Amino acid sequence: MEDDVIVEVPDGPALEARLRLAESARGGLVVCHPHPLYGGDMDNPVVVRAAEVATESGLSTLRFNFRGVGRSSGTHDRGEGEGHDLKAALEMLRNRLPPGRPLGLAGYSFGAWIAARVTASGVPLTALCLIAPPLSMFDFGALDGVDRDILVVAGTRDTCCPTSGLSVLAERMPTARMATIDGADHFFFGKLFPLGELIRGWADRWAPG
């Protein structure tokens, strides 16, 4: 069962969040939601599905609302403040894990962009999952040369993450695993199950039981 918690951002807002601690957790996963200005929040079905699968895989999970979303204080900050939000969320979950357990990060759409930028900044992480990264809207060049267990997932009908963009991203991140879900759009309508199975396989690689 998830607990309602507050993530305190240093010199920043207080963020609404939900934390689920697994017994003898194999690791932890923080999940970031899509764009706040287009209705994105931590209760998005893709975010919820990612957290559910991680829980089933024995991971502790934390999903949260960026500043200005839901009951989180503050206002949208075009990605800058949201990076600080994510770093505070990662620190909270890291402090709740047993010593030495790996920590992963997953982001969906806008959340994938924030996750990529924070990972590239050098925050200690074991793994990164980019779900439907909006390559047509944001620059993911910060990930060039980043060495993590990276999974990139997109649908074949996702106009925000075209196949051509994925090919370019794959060339820039040769160690990343690229996966596509046939027929899925940017919202994964009717495709949450295969998305979850890809996330499960990724989690099992970097946080083995």
Image (cartoon, rainbow, N blue to C red):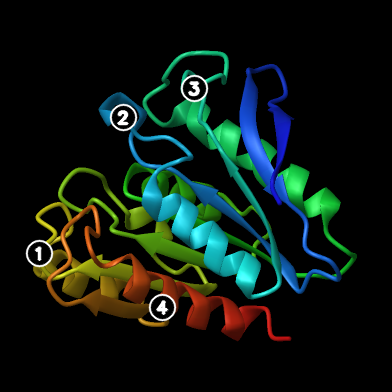
User: Horizontal and vertical percent for residue 97?
Assistant: 83, 59
Residue behind mark 2: 39
User: Horizontal and vertical percent for residue 9?
Assistant: 68, 26
Residue behind mark 1: 157
x 22%, y 58%: residue: 189
User: Horizontal and vertical percent for residue 20?
Assistant: 71, 52
Q: Which mark is residue 198?
A: 4
Residue type marked 2: Gly
Task: Answer with mark 4 or mark 2, whichever residue precedes in sequence.
Answer: 2
Label 2 SS: loop
Q: Give the distance between the C-alpha atoms of the residues marked 1 and 3, in whole angstroms.
A: 30 Å
Label 1 SS: loop
Q: Is residue 25 above or below residue 171?
A: above
Q: Is residue 132 above or below residue 7?
A: below
Task: Answer with mark 1 or mark 3, whichever residue precedes in sequence.
Answer: 3
Residue type marked 1: Arg
Task: Answer with mark 1 or mark 2, whichever residue precedes in sequence.
Answer: 2
- For the question of whether residue 126 can be seen, the reply is no
The quarter in which the C terminus is drawn is bottom right
Estimate how packed mark 3 is, as few (under 14), some (14 to 19) or many (20 or more) residues with alpha carbons within 10 Å.
some
144 horizontally vs 50: left or right: left
Residues at marks 1 and 4 touching, judged by CB atoms closer than 8 Å: no
Label 4 SS: helix
Task: Answer with mark 3 or mark 2, whichever residue precedes in sequence.
Answer: 2
Residues at marks 1 and 2 touching, judged by CB atoms closer than 8 Å: no
Estimate how packed mark 2 is, as few (under 14), some (14 to 19) or many (20 or more) residues with alpha carbons within 10 Å.
few
6 horizontally vs 57: left or right: right
Task: Answer with mark 4 or mark 3, whichever residue precedes in sequence.
Answer: 3
Estimate how packed mark 1 is, as few (under 14), some (14 to 19) or many (20 or more) residues with alpha carbons within 10 Å.
some
Residue behind mark 3: 70
